[in-house]
Amino acid sequence: MKFITRIILFAGLTLTATAYGQAPKYSNEFLSIGVGARALGMSNSNVAGVNDVTSGYWNPAGLSQMTGRVQVGLMHAEYFAGIAKYDYGAIAARIDSHSVAGLSVIRFGVDDIPNTTELIDSDGNVNYDNVQSFSAADYAFILTYARQNKKVAGLRYGANAKIINRKVGKFANAWGFGIDLGAQYNVKNWHFGASYRDATSTFNAWRFDIPDNMRDVFASTGNTIPSNSVEVTLPRLILAAGYKWNIKKFSVYTEVDFNITTDGKRNVAIKSDPFSIDPTFGLELGYGNFVFLRAGVGNIQKYTDDNGKQVTSVQPNMGLGIKLRSVCIDYALTDIGNASVAPYSNVFSLRFDINAKGGSKK
């Protein structure tokens, strides 16, 4: 079963890469999964309240709130019963009292995919020695700069410069570049945030190197032979607002995010062409800045069931976190998409504060 699934994933990746040259929708979607178990447990409702090393992904402005001199973040997750692996690592360092810089690296890939195009040799015999494996992987390298405004208290802003590399074995390779912008503003207990991803659009230039024997297989099976093309990721705006209560040793933080895409009509709560809005809601309960319980809802979709009835589905997520001095351990029970397509995954992430002054607040 795993063999068949990997073949299907490979076919999907190849055909999708070809289609990207014509349609920008869902481009670079591996960058929409999210990083950090805290945010994933809150259904990605994190743009207004993020204040640590993961800000390089969620909202570059939040990185300026990092306490201490250096922070390191790590995460590993597996999806589709362990077939697809998602890895994240980041480091951020304070430049001065008002500015911080960081570097984040993301990899989402499927490894050990069998290439069966040469399974049958020229004499018509099945030769398993001709089957070789390869990987299909997406990489992102994100350089972040964030700064606090000296004149307006509570105002922060930041930017990302990101390099994208996507490859399918030796057959296809793409390089891209994009810019993200972000801002945050706090007033009393209110937190507001905006993240403008792919602000200038991100362009991935695909180059295909298909061997002649594979071209023959593509042609004989009626598949389109991929050609060099450019994949475009259109801008996406996320607006968020959160509120925090402090009651003695207890804290309550709630946030709602509105993910506004510009690449056409999507199957989300508010859909139109070309703009669609996907709202998410997250909640975090804390005690003594030591233990945290989290929950969230998102991925609101409408679909037709087997009986022809319109059904609205909502994806719930949950998680918890523990802070031990300069180390934060977070856990989330979450899903990459619809639970009917892929089962929920257990995600763990770590954050280390180096030379921290009390550590970052959640």
Image (cartoon, rainbow, N blue to C red):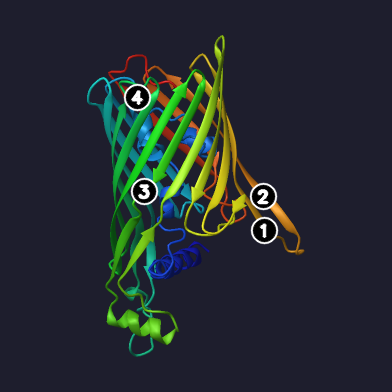
Instruction: Say which of 337 and 278 sits in front.
Output: 278
Q: What is the x, y in percent for residue 353? A: 33, 23
Q: CA distance from mark 4 to mark 3?
A: 24 Å
Name the spot of residue 37 as percent of width and height, x first: 47, 35
Q: Which residue matches tag 1?
A: 303
* Percent coordinates x, y for residue 137 in the rendering: 35, 57
The label shown at residue 18 is none
Label 2 and label 4: CA atoms lie apart by 36 Å
Q: Residue at x 57, y 43 (%)?
A: 279
- Is 237 in front, or is 126? 237
Residue type, mark 4 in image: Met
Check if mark 1's residue and mark 3's residue have beta carbons within 8 Å.
Answer: no
Please report contact status of discs 1 and 2: CB closer than 8 Å, yes or no. Answer: yes
Q: Secondary structure at mark 4?
A: loop
Q: Looking at the picture, how far across and down is residue 286, in whole percent?
A: 54, 20
Name the mark on residue 199: 3
Q: In whole angstroms, how far apart are the C-alphas of marks 2 and 3? A: 31 Å
Question: In the image, what residue type sits under mark 1?
Answer: Tyr
Name which of mark 4 and mark 1 comes first in the sequence.
Answer: 4
| Residue named by callout 4 | 66
State the separation of the CA atoms marked 1 and 2.
8 Å
Residue type (three-letter) at the residue carrying disc 3? Ala
For the residues labelled 4 and 1, say whether their Cβ atoms are less than 8 Å apart.
no
Circle 2 sits in a helix, a strand or a loop, which is it? Answer: strand
Q: Which residue is mark 2?
A: 313
